[in-house]
Image (cartoon, rainbow, N blue to C red):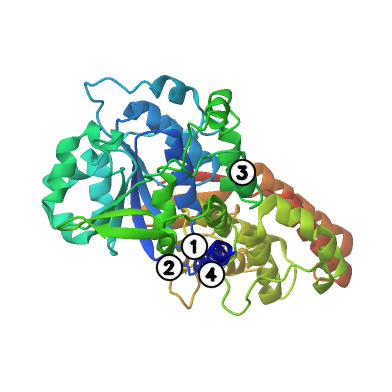
Amino acid sequence: MFKKIIALLFLSLVFNAVVSAHSGKPKYHVIIDTDGAIDDMRAISMFLAQNDTRVLAITCSQGTLAPDSIFVKVNNLLSAFHHEGIPVGLDKKLETDLPPWAAYTQKIKWASSVSSQLACQKISSVDLISSVFNNYSDKITLVALGSLKTYAELVKAHPEYVDKIERIVWYNNPYIDTDFNESVSPESYTYFKERNIPLEVVGNNTDRYNVDEAYLETIKGSDSKYAKQIAWVHQHPEIVSRMEAEHLQLWDDLVALYLTVPILFQTEKAGGEVSYVTLQNELPDAVVNEAISAILVSGNQTTNRVFNTFPVAADLYKPAYAKMLESTIENYGLIEWKAISMTNEIHGHTGIYSIIGAKMGIRAMEYFNVGVNNLSVTTFAGKKPPLSCFNDGIQISSGATIGQGLITVSDTVLDVPTITALFNKQKIKISVKPEIAAQMQEEIKYGVQTYGLLTEPYWLYIEKLAIRYWSEFDRNQIFTIEKL
């Protein structure tokens, strides 16, 4: 009974830590280095889902797989989550053999679709990390899911960035002679032990915390795209057989869990700036699984200032909106639902261009995987309705508002709703697809010709049209995105 009480207390603290983390400005700013193992896929998904963590870049270094293979998997995963704006770098291939499990790991797809980013120019990991440090004002946590080789090369090449490193969090079991991640580049571990940079070595030194059916069933209950992707990957026969044989454990996953919920872990100083981190003794598997589930769902939650949770009870909405509420949230998520609902309230009516603006603002944030108040936006919708109504949707959904000084209305007005969005010196152009824009213009024209401009029947027609766009237009299908 005592253990159950302690477990429930831990679980309560976990949910409070995760659920309360809904500021547009994150606590943790991370770069992730991966060696392509299956547990890396789970860990990266957890990092991407965390509201309190901003992933600034992902680099691919040899370990389980060769860098080029990892590069493909990471880009496909980011594309599946619509986070294509997170840059990916890669190391040089090492002249060493891959481990025995590389063959089966290579077969595992991290996503079903092929990323459009694969044709992009490849950049070395050190150059990419250097550019991130150069452009970013906050201190950065370096997460190592493979060896420490990439980060050692970074510090050797750019010692000027040492003061901008918050800490290094590395998965490696320190309680065995040589764990795999260390064996890839033992000299890099030695290098950091002698540096004045905090190094937190996270490990699973037990035979517990398996990735099994209980784990999968728990995360599936979170209604999260990140959890669904993990579940999809773990349907692969090679993984299923290893799960059944209890050959899969929570390994690199624990790094993502530790960063968000450190209360679940215990820390032992190992001398100098090095600490060893493991899960609290006898922590039940169910608590760990529930904590991971809470992290995976946190990315679906809205950023609230007045509400504890954004209201979604159908009886709070007018009939036309109540009817579409459940299916629309299921299709496009609560974040978009809130953005469009608030846009309509503030805008003063259910408008077509304002709804498109709200969808575009959400898509821009999703592309970079950032929260509100993080993008600098220029719109090309002018200041004359109805096209300028688009600007209200952009402001309310993204937080790039006049008051924040994050939005500019260009003197150039384009017929197709368009913005440029800037984050950390990365700039993109997002436009409504021409065929969608033409459809909207034709349907608005029909309303004017049929009902007369600004008549009561016209506004009723526009509202019905806007509701249809709201419920039928998928933000991941109606826009084109171009890197500038």
268 or 401: which is nearer to us?
Answer: 268
Q: Which residue is mark 3?
A: 214
Task: Pinpoint residue 108: horizontal percent, then vertical percent.
Answer: 50, 27
Q: Badge 3: few (under 14), some or many (20 or more) residues near its Cα, within 10 Å?
A: few
Looking at the image, the residue that sits furthest to the front is 1
Q: Which residue is mark 1?
A: 371
Q: Is residue 192 left or right of residue 467?
A: left
Q: Which one is earlier in the sequence, the residue at label 4 or at label 3? A: 4
Q: Which one is earlier in the sequence, the residue at label 2 or at label 3? A: 2
Mark 2 → mark 3, Cα distance in angstroms? 34 Å
Q: Secondary structure at mark 4?
A: helix
Q: Which residue is mark 2?
A: 25
Answer whether residue 161 is visible to the viewer in this image.
yes
**Quarter residue 318 falls in:** bottom right
Q: Which one is earlier in the sequence, the residue at label 3 or at label 1? A: 3
On the rendered image, what quadrant is the N terminus found in? bottom right
54 or 277: which is nearer to us?
Answer: 277
Q: Which residue is mark 4?
A: 16
Q: Which one is earlier in the sequence, the residue at label 1 or at label 4? A: 4
Q: Is residue 443 left or right of residue 250?
A: right
Q: Is residue 70 left or right of residue 397?
A: left
Answer whether residue 452 is visible to the viewer in this image.
no
* Residue type at numbered disc 4: Asn
**Quarter residue 362 falls in:** bottom right
* Residue type at numbered disc 2: Lys
Task: Pinpoint residue 399: horizontal percent, then vertical percent.
Answer: 51, 69
Mark 3 → mark 1, Cα distance in angstroms? 32 Å
